[in-house]
Image: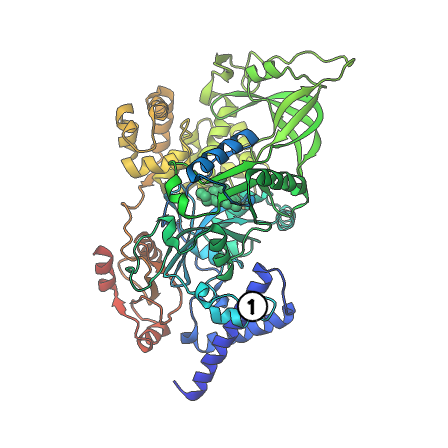
Amino acid sequence: MTASEGEVRRRADRLRAEIRRHDHLYHVENRPEISDGAYDRLFRELQAIEEEFPHLLTPDSPTQRVGADPLSQLPVVRHVVAMLSLDSSESEEDLRRFDERVRKAMDGPVEYLVEPKLDGSSLELVYVDGVLDRAVTRGNGVEGEGVTENARTIPSVPLRLRLAEELATLGPSDGDSSESADAFLIPSLLAVRGEVLMHLSSFEELNRTRVEAGLEPYANPRNAAAGALRQLDSRITRTRPLEFFAFDILDIRWAASGTEEGEASAAEEAKGFDTDEQAVEALRRWGLRLPDRTRKVADIDEAIAYHAEFARDRDGLDYEIDGVVLKLNALAPRGALGSTSHHPRWAFAFKFAPRQEVTRLERITVQVGRTGKLTPLALLRPVEVGGVTVSRASLHNREELERKDVRAGDLVRIQRAGDVIPQVVERVEEPGRVRGEPFRMPEECPRCGAAVVEEGPFVVCSNRLGCPAQLERGIEHFVSRGGLDIEGLGSETVALLVGEGLVCEPADLFDVTPDDLLKLEGFAETRSRKLAAAIQRARKTELARFIYGLGIPEVGATVARVLAAEFRDLTILRTTTAERLEEVEGIGPIMSEKITAFFFDEARAASLDAILSKGFELIPPPERESRALEGKSFVFTGRLDSITRSEAKKRVESLGGRVVSSVSSATGYLVRGERPGSKARKAEELEVPVLDEQAFLRLLEE
Ligand code: IVH
């Protein structure tokens, strides 16, 4: 490298440090020091250098938050240690019982760390030698979805942990001279747990722009955050205003002498901290953002006061919280307290009571669901409940309706808990007012006129797929995002197709031609062609999506995945017995009954046969994944003969590797195909191992 290139390298390093510092000040500490313009200048200078000298580009450069090529599916990734849930309750009694259990085990007074329970989407970040290696959603707690590229676009997710030297340049307001440099050592592995969320103001802004663009607004900030985090295309995630807050060290390993590097140290005492306070302080110093108002309390009464304080302030906050979390501050006894399979015994979420409001019930109507259930629905005078306008609420079923005895014209108390449909809690007495007639559930299906039957507390339309409402809901579910994911086929179009008689059973959908669609309201040439093509394409799909789409009672996306992985073939699944199903982990007797009842039902079986006769290709999930390529990155250049780029990428990812677009000294392998580009030369310069197509395929095989 020439002397001038040495200078350039130093300049790039300097710029990166500066930009990281400003990123941190802005996104984590909320106290920017320079103007946006000045920041942009630094950023552009760095970008220009990296463009001119691509080999100076590092994967953890602040310019690398731009989003990568879209994935075909999110890889399943195992957590470093299981991400458990939290024990929780709204009742002070339950909380006190928790405290008593802890005190008994501790044999003395206990301190808790208390903080808000953020209502977002849970995420694990794993740093290897201080560099962000992967990000994994909670999933089932053991395995989640790898969303690394998406997490990289979140400004408050550090691409690498901050070091002592960087802190030293942060200026007097941040540097506390009494801090020992030891605290800034970088662990060889750090798994951090935190929450991804969207601030309410950003959420409203996002919804405004969506509505203007003719798109559906998101139901709430949590769904918006979770959806953005699970995008296949990180360039979309990048446009969403996400934030990350860290609150727990899942695992930490030090490559110190004496202990073997990489040795698992799930035991709390091995984390190198005595208290949770120290642990979160370390997170803060490494550059992670912590929840606001975290506090240490000396006893349970203080924690209850903290909860009350937060409940009062709740509506004034710019983010959603659904309670406060208490964690035993001392780390050593955590191991002794242990955990259940669901939650640790050293933490507790003291939840807020759901938000309630009183409004007038204008009318009761009945909705027919996918399984034929008739649900009474309260149409309300619109009212704002905790920032959301509510105009309808579920009355659940006949029994509930009778028990609550609400009638048109009554004043009712409603509540919203999380994102579940608002509920009618009770009728509010109005002495002296003359009430309307009690509501009676219809004896015929309001949609198809067929007789209804009573099933326990429910009233069900007996007409099944003969009922247009059930057919519509069933098709909507079949083609929904978790199912066949047919773009452009929303509930309105489904209703038109059914209403016009083009679709009388789900299989008919696959005979719909562009000409058929042209006859529908709102369909011109392009739209018709696109939708018809999307429907045809959907016949090749993942087995798990297809199973989910069938709408088998009790079978959601997770169970569908489990079934697809276990049986790998629809014919085998269809003919399996309840006993065999029960052998599958996560499938109990009720679920296995429902599954076999569904497949052995004559009408369902005929409908399924009709669908399959349209020619489906159902792809089973990749075989049990191995992590053989863990931590290895691949760059492709040139044309591959026997495998497509996207297939190659999928294979690498299924083995735990990553595919990146540019070569750096950190690149694991360069795969060189026919007529390679400049990347090949660069790889040679940087002494990155180069594989030809055959060698690459052999590596995958091994
Ligand atoms: S502590 C097992 N602290 O709540 C203990 N969790 O209902 C580790 N959550 O999925 C979690 N805010 O993602 C903790 N301040 C906070 C939290 C928090 C939100 C989430 C967490 C978990 C869920 C459990």
User: Disc count in the image?
Assistant: 1
Instruction: Check the image and name the residue furthest to the right.
Output: 432
Decide if residue 479 is in sight here: no
Q: Is residue 332 left or right of residue 355?
A: left
Residue 380 is at least partly visible in this image: yes
Which residue is farthest bottom?
A: 3
Farthest residue to the front: give it.
Answer: 108
**Left or right: residue 646 compared with residue 246:** left
Residue at 26% x, 31% y: name it.
Answer: 572
Q: Is residue 394 above or below residue 556?
A: above
Q: Looking at the picture, how far across and down is residue 178, in whole percent?
A: 53, 67
Which picture quadrant has residue 302? top right
Q: Is mark 1 within 8 Å of ligand 1?
A: no
Q: Nearer the viewer, residue 221 or 111?
A: 111
- 531 in relation to 24, above or below: above
Secondary element under disc 1, as helix, strand or loop, is loop
In this rendered view, identify the residue nearer to me: 241 or 462: 241
* Horizontal arrangement in the rendering, residue 258 relative to residue 431 (left or right): left
Q: Position of residue 67 (x, y in %)?
A: 48, 60
Query: For residue 102, what is the image quadrant?
Result: top left
Where, quadrant-wise, is the C terminus in this rendering?
bottom left
The residue that mark 1 highlights is 175
Residue 649 as seen in the image, left or right of residue 515: left
Between residue 375 and residue 21, name the one nearer to us: 21
- Residue shown at the point (44%, 57%) measured from the top left: 149
**In the picture, which quadrant includes the N terminus?**
bottom left
Image spot of residue 361 (x, y percent) = 69, 23
Whole-percent x and y of residue 576?
Answer: 27, 27
> Three-letter amino acid code at disc 1?
Gly
